[in-house]
Amino acid sequence: MQLYRVPIEIVPRPGILDPQGAAVVGALKALGFDSVTDVRIGRFVTVDVNAESAAHATTAVRGMCEKLLANPVIEDFALEDPTVQPNQSS
Amino acid sequence: MKFGIVTFPGSNGDYDACQAAANALGQTAVYLWHKNHDLQGCDVIILPGGFSYGDYLRAGAIARFSPIMNEVIAHARRGAPVLAICNGFQVACEAGLLPGALLRNASLRFISRPINMRVENATSMFTREYFAGQVLRVPVAHGDGRYAADPDVLARLEGDNRVVFRYSAADASVSDADNINGSAHGIAGIVSEGGNVLGMMPHPERAVDPILGTPDGLGVFHSLLAEVAA
């Protein structure tokens, strides 16, 4: 077994109004960043899992996202590639 | 008739719900700790307001997996009544007892004040003591009350008359100005496909006596009483 860290990006689905993002667009424009057209605010999660391989780690974390970490009604999620972590002392 | 009020860590509407059932309605009411598996023979389960698990991750997302939710879901699948208020509505959506989800208020503000809502469906087991078109004055207290669902889900809710409460003006008119949190279709409360789970953001249990400013929420409890007695 190897310890992997799997980063997850969770963002509001397209079409879901994101008032936080809209407020930040307004603030950025007020600061003179006129080129901004849209901001979406989500969350970034990292999960550390013990797994036999990077593929197994990804599969496990995908299941966690589907069951708990993201709500498919309102959110999309994307997994980044797992990175090997130093094994914790046992 | 026996009401069971689920207490999650972070619930704060459980006491109000218990008082409404016990004092205003004169029925038996018990608290059900979220880690237990026993509904104690309750006829009606109330998922109360509050901030279960600090609203961590998403409002209701972690409470939805509390041990007692297995029994609450089974209770609902049997067609027995579940009244899901505010945070309870969020929990019920996360648990799949109701479609959709509740997002941050469009204003980004926490809203804590009395509001008006119109009874859209006075035939549900929760609303038979009202009449269709009646305007109720009931308090809200939430930061994440903006109801959202896919367009086909919204169409089905409307088509099946499952939108039971909609934010409105005092004269029963409906406009964006009265849609306090930006909910899709101004939805304040919906029932499940079987009609036995009501999710609503406003607090009927905090509107059961004129001394509280309005008794307009009592009808929800009286409707349930008539339903279970029948």
Image (cartoon, rainbow, N blue to C red):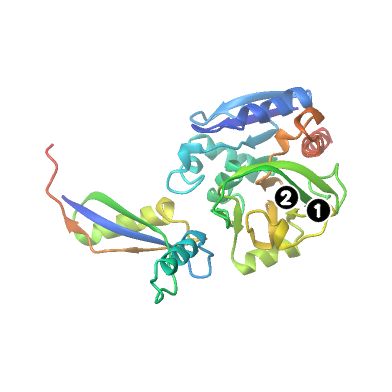
Q: Residues within 10 Å of mark 1 (few under 14, many from 20)?
A: many
Where disc 2 sits, the SS reads: loop
Q: Which mark sits nearer the N-terminus, 2 or 1? A: 1
Coordinates of residue B157 in the picture (x, y in percent): 70, 61
Q: Is residue B140 above or below residue B180?
A: above
Q: Which residue is mark 2?
A: B195
Amino acid, disc 1: Asn
Question: Which of the image's four quarters has the C terminus of chain A?
Answer: top left
Provide the chain ID for the residue under circle 1: B
Coordinates of residue A32 in the picture (x, y in percent): 39, 71
Is B78 in front, or is B67? B67
Q: Is residue B41 visible?
A: no
Coordinates of residue B112 in the picture (x, y in percent): 63, 42
Q: Which residue is mark 1?
A: B121
Q: Is residue B76 visible?
A: yes
* Front position among marks 2 and 1: 1
- Marks 2 and 1 sit apart, C-alpha to C-alpha, by 11 Å
Q: Is residue B146 above or below residue A17?
A: above
Is A5 in front, or is A60? A5
Q: Which mark is residue B113?
A: none
Classify residue A55 as left or right of residue B12. Answer: left
Coordinates of residue B129 in the picture (x, y in percent): 86, 41
Q: Residues within 10 Å of mark 2 (few under 14, many from 20)?
A: some
Question: Are the residues flagged by discs 2 and 1 from a single subunit?
Answer: yes
Provide the chain ID for the residue under circle 2: B
Where disc 1 sits, the SS reads: loop
Image point (49%, 64%), residue name = A22
Residue A59 placement: quadrant: bottom left
Classify residue B80 as left or right of residue B130. Answer: left
Image point (67%, 26%), residue name = B18
Amino acid, disc 2: Gly
